[in-house]
């Protein structure tokens, strides 16, 4: 069976999908081996390729994105990335105690033509109420039906009830929907990046532009999609700029840029922009968020994204089936990959409250007042109005916002600089500070508390960070996995250390850092979790983290010269740590001047946090704390 050359990099799929088993007899194991040898991103050990079935080979890779699909499976997969076709009135709803709350209305649907709106409450269908139907699920069943049949929906809006007659029809739910909320916020929700998503962005932004002075793009739950689509969507938002870089197994780099966008094409959104993400925002949606971050174009709110930084090519076979193979790693415009770590928001808040936090921040611009909190975030000013912040609907979101603020965040009330504690006292509202109380006297207090506000470091059971305590190897792996959001595939198994039991509190962190190539054991196969980490060990591991996360760090490590290695301050390090010491020093990652660092002295917890912070800041993974 012949197979075609893979699609060009710009047409790679970037979707988060489930592993599918190959159809018996559709492709031979030897043909699959041939494809993997030639195209897979990493060289595959022969002992893996020698496994007897395609399933066993792909499982041993620990890569759920590489697998075989029959022609029908591939057709279904492509459909899942695009618009959804259903029969009904064209609404998405959520169940409440009183009825079905409308959360989305498909354009040009029976519901939109009848005037149904987001937030409306459906309380009856053809006169049958929730109570009479028995449940909201049963009521939803009454609304559905065959195309061409009629249904009367009873809707409650602003305390009044209205009956709307509709004729059921085939309805398309697009991957992107748009509306203006609160009278001035352009709100785009993108559920995946399918074939038409880019053009939807252009349409909705253009339609809402005159009314909107703030924008929100909601990518929560967006599992990814097609590269061409997300590149086009980014182009419509911020103009003709590089969206990502692709690196193949040979180290060759290519770029994704909106095409055919003229070079001088500006973005369609010039007003302050928020991007909402969560742990299910993956792949193409991570590229979108990372592009906005790297170009300082948007404020990102939510939780750390999934962490898929690998791209797949689809290799078509002559019967319509395909091998979907990981062929590239991708990097953001600042050369940073989300692989195994995700995109870290500027404000880390409960994903279910992220939209409410965004609406609070997108309050209308106002003059200085004790009732308006003005914040500077992501290079833009944001206005939170006291009346909204303290309302029953938004109070939990406001508490989340205050908790998520890093120390030194520029913010004022009535023209006077304030901090979250002052705002909480002045507005008589409560919040839970994430800052560590025992780091006030640390020279690295702002770095530590910025990481704490982001949920990237934690204290002990008493909320203490213990900044001056020496860092153990167990604490090291816990620190870096939490700060960077690292994870590994469970089918990669346990790390092969004889002294780390599965019940140990640090066991998962050991497994993750081992499989990512960040830590090793000693000659006896032990991890030695209680041993202290000295400076040269920590700096070496920091350099490994940097190489994994950021191409720029890798380039610097590869460019270290013999002259640099011969410097007296470098020579005091062991030979295996010298390149890392040179690179970390030149990139500004060290907690102290290189001349003042004793390579064999223990690394303290505060020094470790400061250096991790500086790596994340250098790469743009986080926004630096003011003054840090």
Image (spheres, rainbow, N blue to C red):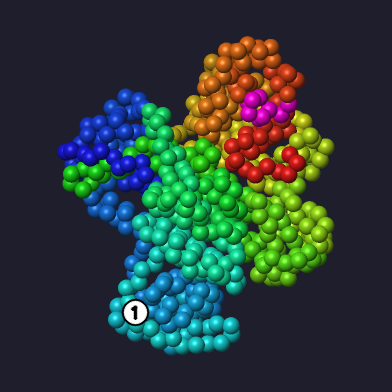
Q: Nearer the viewer, residue 134 or 444?
A: 444
State the quadrant of the C terminus: top right
Left or right for 398, reference 24: right
Query: What x and y, as percent, mark residue 27?
Result: 20, 40
The residue at 59%/60% (across/down) is 271
Residue 156 in the image: above or below residue 410: below
**Which residue is more in the foreground, 230 or 319?**
230
* Residue identified by numbered label 1: 168
Q: Residue at x 41, y 55 (%)?
A: 193
Where is residue 119? Give x, y as percent: 53, 75
Mark 1, residues whose alpha carbon is within 10 Å: few (<14), some, or many (≥20)?
many
Instruction: Say left or right for 90 vs 315.
Output: right
Q: Was residue 214 drawn as part of the magenta stretch in this picture?
A: no
- Residue 135 vertical position relative to residue 233 in the rendered view, above or below: below
Instruction: Please provide percent x and percent y for residue 458.
Output: 68, 42
Q: Residue at x 54, y 31 (%)?
A: 552
Task: Identify the image quadrant of residue 184.
Answer: bottom right
Q: Main secondary structure of the magenta part?
A: loop
Residue 479, can we see it? no
Image quadrant occupied by the N terminus: top left
The range drawn in magenta is 584-592
**In the rendered view, does 428 fall on the left or right side of 456?**
right
Report which quarter residue 166 is drawn in.
Answer: bottom left
For residue 591, say whether it is visible: yes
Measured as percent of width and height from the top left, residue 329 is found at 43, 37
Pick whichever, 460 or 564, lies toward us: 564
Q: Secondary structure at mark 1?
A: loop
Say left or right for 128 vs 465.
left
Rendered view: 594 above or below 479: above
- From the viewer's perspective, is residue 114 above or below residue 107? below
């Amino acid at each position: 069976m012949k197979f075609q050359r893979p699609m060009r990099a710009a047409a790679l799929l970037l979707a988060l999908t489930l592993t599918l088993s190959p159809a018996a007899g559709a492709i031979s194991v030897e043909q699959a081996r041939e494809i993997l040898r030639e195209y897979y991103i990493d060289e595959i050990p022969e002992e893996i390729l020698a496994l007897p079935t395609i399933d066993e080979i792909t499982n041993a890779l620990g890569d759920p994105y590489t697998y075989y699909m029959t022609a029908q499976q591939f057709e279904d997969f492509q459909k899942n990335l695009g618009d959804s076709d259903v029969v009904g009135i064209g609404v998405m709803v959520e169940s409440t105690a009183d009825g079905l709350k409308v959360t989305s209305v498909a354009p040009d649907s029976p519901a939109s033509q009848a005037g149904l709106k987001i937030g409306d409450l459906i309380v009856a269908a053809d006169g049958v109420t929730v109570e009479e139907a028995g449940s909201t699920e049963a009521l939803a069943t009454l609304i559905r039906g065959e195309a061409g049949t009629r249904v009367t929906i009873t809707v409650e809006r602003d305390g009044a009830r209205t009956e709307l007659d509709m004729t059921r029809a085939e309805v398309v739910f697009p991957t992107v929907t748009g509306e203006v909320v609160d009278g001035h916020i352009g709100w785009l929700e993108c559920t995946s990046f399918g074939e038409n998503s880019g053009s939807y962005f252009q349409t909705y932004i253009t339609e809402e532009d005159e009314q909107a002075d703030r924008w929100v793009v909601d990518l929560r739950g967006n599992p990814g999609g097609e590269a061409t689509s997300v590149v086009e969507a980014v182009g419509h938002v911020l103009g003709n700029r590089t969206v990502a870089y692709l690196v193949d197994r040979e180290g060759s780099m290519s770029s994704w840029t909106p095409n055919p966008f003229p070079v001088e094409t500006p973005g369609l959104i010039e007003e302050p922009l928020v991007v909402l993400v969560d742990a299910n925002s993956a792949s193409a949606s991570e590229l979108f968020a990372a592009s906005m971050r790297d170009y300082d174009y948007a404020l990102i709110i939510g939780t750390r994204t999934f962490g898929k930084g690998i791209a797949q090519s689809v290799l078509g076979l002559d019967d319509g089936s395909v091998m979907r193979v990981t062929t590239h790693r991708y990097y953001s415009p600042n050369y940073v990959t989300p692989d195994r770590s995700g995109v870290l928001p500027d404000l880390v808040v409960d994903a279910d409250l992220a939209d409410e936090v965004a609406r609070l921040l997108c309050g209308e611009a106002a003059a200085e007042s004790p009732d308006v909190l003005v914040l500077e975030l992501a290079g833009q000013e944001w206005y939170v109005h006291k009346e909204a912040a303290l309302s029953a609907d938004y109070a939990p979101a406001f508490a989340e916002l205050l908790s998520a603020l890093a120390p030194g965040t520029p913010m004022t009330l009535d023209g006077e600089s304030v901090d979250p504690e002052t705002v909480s006292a002045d507005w008589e509202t409560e919040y839970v500070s994430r800052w560590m109380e025992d780091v006030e006297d640390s020279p690295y207090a702002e770095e530590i508390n910025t990481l704490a506000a982001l949920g990237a470091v934690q204290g002990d059971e008493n909320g203490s960070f213990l900044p001056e305590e020496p860092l153990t190897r167990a604490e090291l792996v816990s620190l870096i996995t939490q700060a960077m959001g690292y994870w590994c595939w469970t089918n990669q198994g346990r790390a092969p250390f004889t002294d780390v039991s599965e019940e140990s509190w640090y066991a998962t962190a050991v497994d993750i850092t081992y499989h990512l190539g960040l830590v090793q054991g000693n000659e006896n196969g032990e991890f030695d979790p209680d041993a202290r980490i000295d400076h040269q060990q920590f700096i070496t591991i920091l350099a490994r983290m940097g190489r994994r996360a950021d191409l720029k760090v890798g380039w610097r490590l590869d460019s270290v010269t013999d002259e640099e290695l011969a410097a007296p301050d470098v020579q005091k390090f062991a030979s295996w740590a010298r390149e890392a010491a040179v690179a970390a020093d030149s990139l500004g990652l060290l907690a102290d001047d290189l001349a003042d660092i004793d390579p064999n002295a223990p690394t303290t917890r505060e020094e470790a946090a400061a250096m991790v912070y500086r790596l994340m800041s250098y790469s743009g993974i986080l926004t630096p704390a003011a003054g840090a």
